[in-house]
Image (cartoon, rainbow, N blue to C red):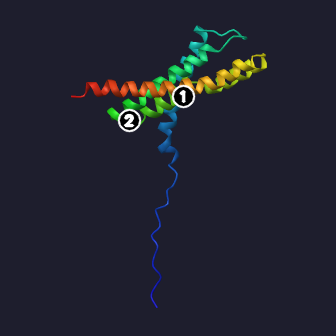
C-alpha cells in the first residue's frame, strides 16, 4: 500500500496588518477631505435653490468622473507612480469630490417636491453622463498620449 498523495495547499493569506494599511488609510482620508472641501466650495459658488434642479451636483459628478478617466489612463498606462497616489487622488480626492450620496438626496428632494418626472430623469441622466465622461476622457487621453509617443 502506498502513502496517500500529499496535497499542496495554497499558502494562507493573512490580512494585512493595520500598520501596513495605515499609510493607505491616511492617504484616502486626507484626499477625501480635500475632495469634499472642493465639492463644498462648488456648492457655495453655484448654489441651487431648494426647488431648483441640482445642476451643481450633476456637473461636479460629471467633472469628477472625467478627471477619473484621465487619471486612470495616466497612472495605469503611461507612468509609474508612488503607491499612495492612487488611494490619495483616485479614491480620496475624487471620491470625496464626486457625490453620489448628494445625488440620491437630490432625487428624493425632487420627487418629494412634486417633480417626480424631473427626479427620474435626473436619476437616469447622472450615471449615463458620468460613465460617458469617464469613457470620453479616457479615450481622449489615450489618443493625446499616443500622439506624443515617438
Residue 140 image label: none
Could you tell whether 119 is left or right of 15 in the image? right
Visible residue check, residue 128: yes
Residue 113 % position (x, y): 77, 16
Marking on residue 76: 2
- Residue at the farthest bottom position: 1
Q: At 45% from the left edge and 79% from the top edge, which residue is drawn?
A: 5
Spot occupied by residue 78 in the image (x, y as percentages of width and height) = 32, 32
Image quadrant of residue 99?
Answer: top right
- The relative height of residue 16 versus residue 44 in the rendered view (above or below) is below
Residue that appears at 48% across and 37% down: 24
**Residue 41 screen position, x and y as percent:** 57, 13
Figure quadrant of the C terminus: top left
**Label ID, residue 95:** 1
Determine whether, in the image, residue 124 is placed left or right of residue 108.
left
SS label for mark 1? helix
Q: For residue 101, which quarter of the picture? A: top right
Question: Is 75 positioned to the left or the right of 36 in the image?
Answer: left
Instruction: Return the x and y of residue 35 as percentages of the image width and height.
Output: 53, 22
Of label 2 and label 1, which has the lower sequence position? 2
Q: Secondary structure at mark 2?
A: helix
Foreground residue among 15 and 8 = 8
Q: Residue at x 63, y 26 (%)?
A: 124
Amino acid at each position: 500500500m502506498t502513502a496517500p498523495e500529499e496535497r499542496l495547499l495554497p499558502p494562507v493569506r493573512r490580512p494585512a496588518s493595520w500598520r501596513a494599511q495605515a499609510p493607505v488609510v491616511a492617504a484616502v482620508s486626507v484626499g477625501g477631505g480635500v475632495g469634499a472641501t472642493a465639492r463644498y466650495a462648488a456648492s457655495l459658488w453655484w448654489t441651487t435653490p431648494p426647488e431648483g434642479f441640482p445642476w451643481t451636483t450633476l456637473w461636479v459628478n460629471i467633472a469628477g468622473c472625467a478627471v477619473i478617466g484621465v487619471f486612470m489612463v495616466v497612472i495605469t498606462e503611461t507612468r509609474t507612480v508612488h503607491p499612495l497616489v492612487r488611494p490619495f487622488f483616485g479614491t480620496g480626492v475624487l471620491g470625496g469630490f464626486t457625490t453620489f450620496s448628494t445625488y440620491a438626496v437630490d432625487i428624493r428632494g425632487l420627487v418629494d417636491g412634486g417633480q417626480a418626472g424631473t427626479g427620474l430623469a435626473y436619476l437616469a441622466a447622472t450615471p449615463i453622463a458620468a460613465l460617458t465622461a469617464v469613457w470620453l476622457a479616457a479615450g481622449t487621453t489615450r489618443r493625446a498620449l499616443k500622439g506624443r509617443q515617438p
